Amino acid sequence: MTGWRLLLTRPADESAALGSLLAEQGIFSSSLPLLDIVPIPVSETMREAFRDLDRYCAVIVVSKPAARIGVELLDRFGPPAPRVKWFSVGAATAQILEARGLDVSFPAQGDDSEALLELAALREAIARFDPQVLILRGEGGRELLAERMRERGASVEYLELYRRELPLYPPAALEHRIKAERLNALVVSSGQGFEHLHQLAGDAWPQLAQLPLFVPSPRVAELARAAGALTVVDCRGASAAALLTALREHPVPVL
């Protein structure tokens, strides 16, 4: 495991936390955040959604930024003790909601939409007359959840709370970082994170595409392979534990 030298691309605070955990395992990492989380200004649509939370049978929170902003809006506009059932895609997102005192269900295995859709508690929540579901996400988030729940008869609304922007870097910053620190693998935590990686790589992408790329889900793996990434490792989750498991199972490349 200690032969890995990873490029982390999550937002700065998340990369710092992940880097510390990796260092405890003897794994070198370098952070180049490719996602800036920018909250969307509070709108009347947001206020109304939180005022009327109890009309939903389920609220699904798909990311940690959505959880943080959602908790703030709940404290400002929501009922003191909402009766709605809460769900999250992963354990880290659930922890933010639980810290607010919310009862949250999430899949024990797999931090992705597919795992959440198999959760018995979610199936039970929407097995009622005229089920209405609210999904808290960033701009352009997961579509699979809504599609599958609509197939099951639920009415689904999105509430977009933030956008993800690519930070401003000088030309060739990504290529220079990888060469200067002799990095041998790339890590992304979302589809948009990969898209920003691909965009920032520019003309160097054919070379960088030869490095192992660790991704959180089959959906992101498909995006990466379609763009030409040669060795894509699906961690089946965005958590540090999922990444560590994938690192143990995959041989360190010889460069």
Image (spheres, grey):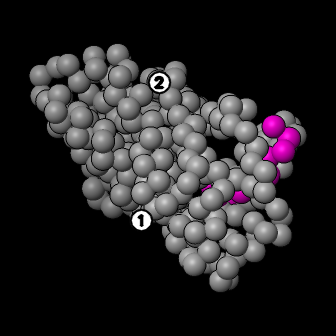
Assign a secondary structure to mark 2.
loop
> Residue 123's image quarter?
top left
Bounds of the magenta span? 1-12
**Where in the figure is residue 125, as x and y percent of width and height?**
28, 21
Closer to the eye: label 2 or 1: 2
Residue 41 shows which numbered tag?
1
**Relative to residue 146, is residue 84 depicted above or below?**
above
- Residue to which mark 2 is pinned: 107
Q: Nearer the viewer, residue 186 or 40?
A: 186
Give the distance between the C-alpha atoms of the residues marked 2 and 1, in whole angstroms.
Answer: 31 Å
- Residue 213 visible in this rendered orientation of the protein: yes
Dot 1: few (<14), some (14–19), or many (≥20) neighbours within 10 Å?
Answer: few
Q: Of the residues shown, which amino acid type is indicated by label 2?
A: Pro
**Where in the figure is residue 37, as x and y percent of width and height?**
54, 61
**Relative to residue 33, is residue 238 depicted above or below?**
above
44 relative position to 100: left or right: left
